[in-house]
Amino acid sequence: MESLDFDTTVFDKEYVTLGGRREAIVRGGRHLFDRLPAAFDGVNRIGVIGWGSQGPAQAQNLRDSLGDTVKVVVGLRSGSHSFDAARAAGFSESDGTLGEMFEVIAASDMVLLLISDAALAEHHQEILAALRPGTTLGLSHGFLLGHLADTGGSFPAGVDVIAVCPKGMGPSVRALYVQGATVNGAGINASFAVEQDVTGRAVERALGWSVALGAPFTFQTTLRSEYLSDLSGERAMLLAGVHGVVESLYRRFRDHEGMSDHDAFRHSVESVTGPISRTISKDGLIGVYRRLDDDQKAVFAHAYSAAHPVGLELTAEIYDEVSSGNEIRSVILAGKRLDRFPMGRIDQADMWRVGERVRARRDTDGEAPLDPFTAGVFCGIMMAQVDLLLERGHPYSEIANESVIEAVDSLNPYMHARGVAYMVDNCSTTARLGARKWAPRFDYLLTQQTYPAVDDKAVDPAPFAAFEGHVIHQVLDVCSRMRPSVDIFVE
């Protein structure tokens, strides 16, 4: 793992020990907003480019945090249908807070490039050419770095290049920031990276950006490490994996265990998004196991050992596809096909219609069961992603956030509120494409390999043997102490 550390004179850096490794972090909170002018020294105007998943949340959070200190301006492509949505959020041409994309880029001291990855690939040359020397270019994802590496391009030499990457979808970034108005520190964790520092102010501006977004704590990574873990994570456990897991479990409970449709949904989806996710959020993966009685623990261990190999196989394949550039090229090609072949619905199977009725009866049915088989499969797939990212040398903080915290604190609450499409399709186009591509692979391998192994009692217990002593439990324990005291409110 690359050694990381940073210096800041504006914020209070502290160290946490995660799995025996020391990592530097900055804690956030609204009590730090008075430090933002110092963090953004030399920045009079921030241009937020794009109005997709992250754009609305980041533009509004920055505007609310910075007040009159720094002008926040939204830039959109000429003719974009998003102008009306930006106006509805309080940005307008009349006060100079809304304008055409290239005009905003040229006039801004700091440009946050939050357009879709397909648009980045298509327009990055003219966008980068429009940046003034000494400008700070901000990204919330490392996709552009991966695309430049794949095509032999580079960032302009005369600009800072930084990243602040919230560990959650844009609506979560906004929702928890709003909740933070009454609960200091409520927000979505973020990583930051400095790719180029021309001004000598790159670290302070990145940290200021993260604090202004409401991040409870900000940890350091590199831009390459971020996009490898982020693209892989959303194609694995965060979106595609959980989608494939719950669909396969629903059918198993209904067809193999003889449950009613209603009960099969409660034991699969509701169990994952309810008691399992809530327990992991507060007490980690080990907390789920500890909640079970002895018989249930045996079921958990058996399911975990059967699911973990499938999770590891698929996550390794996904990671290789991302790191080789294949997945980035796939996203770009898919983006070019969207006008002809738009993304279809992913909640049209019978189980998701059953889910609508289950959610309507929650007050009558009460808490969903913490099903030990569901828990074992879910935790086995999740831990497989943890193990793969450990194997590839990612920082512990990044592994915890990209594999576990983002899932249970930001994404799964959306599936719990309104179903899988509401979770997936509130994310970026890149994430939505990845979920549709890889979820069927998780469903297929679980159905074809994991469940038959369980039924034939042909499960190797070795994966679970490493579970109780796994390093991620200590990492999540430390991270849980920095967790906001509120849960995201979706419904």
Image (spheres, rainbow, N blue to C red):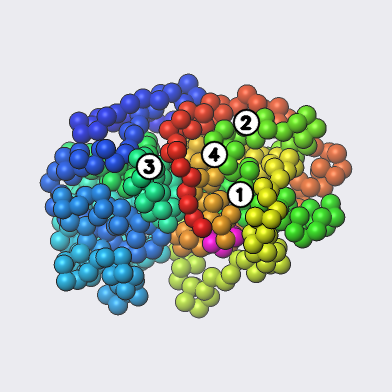
Q: Which mark is residue 281?
A: 4
Q: Dot 1 corresponds to which residue?
A: 273
Q: Is residue 345 left or right of residue 86?
A: right
Residue at horizontal 81 percent and vertical 42 percent from the top: 454
Residue 273 visible to the viewer = yes
Q: Distance of mark 1 from mark 4, alpha carbons?
A: 11 Å
Q: Dot 2 corresponds to which residue?
A: 286
Element marked by disc 2: helix
Residue at horizontal 22 percent and vertical 39 percent from the top: 204
Counting residues from the start of the chain, the first of labels 3 and 4 encountered is: 3
Do the numbered discs 3 and 4 sit on residues whose CB atoms are within 8 Å?
no
Q: Dot 3 corresponds to which residue?
A: 183
Rendering quarter of residue 118 = bottom left
Counting residues from the start of the chain, the first of labels 3 and 1 encountered is: 3
Residue at horizontal 63 percent and vertical 42 percent from the top: 276
Q: Distance of mark 2 from mark 4, alpha carbons?
A: 11 Å
Query: Residue 8 magenta-drawn?
Result: no
Q: Is residue 60 left or right of residue 382?
A: left
Rendering quarter of residue 28 = top left
Do the numbered discs 2 and 4 sit on residues whose CB atoms are within 8 Å?
no
Q: Residues within 10 Å of mark 2 (few under 14, many from 20)?
A: many
User: What percent of the width, then of the height, locates residue 386?
Assistant: 56, 37
Q: Distance of mark 3 from mark 2, alpha carbons?
A: 28 Å
Q: Distance of mark 3 from mark 4, alpha carbons?
A: 18 Å
Q: Magenta span covers which residues?
A: 419-424
Whether 98 is drawn above or below 150: the answer is below
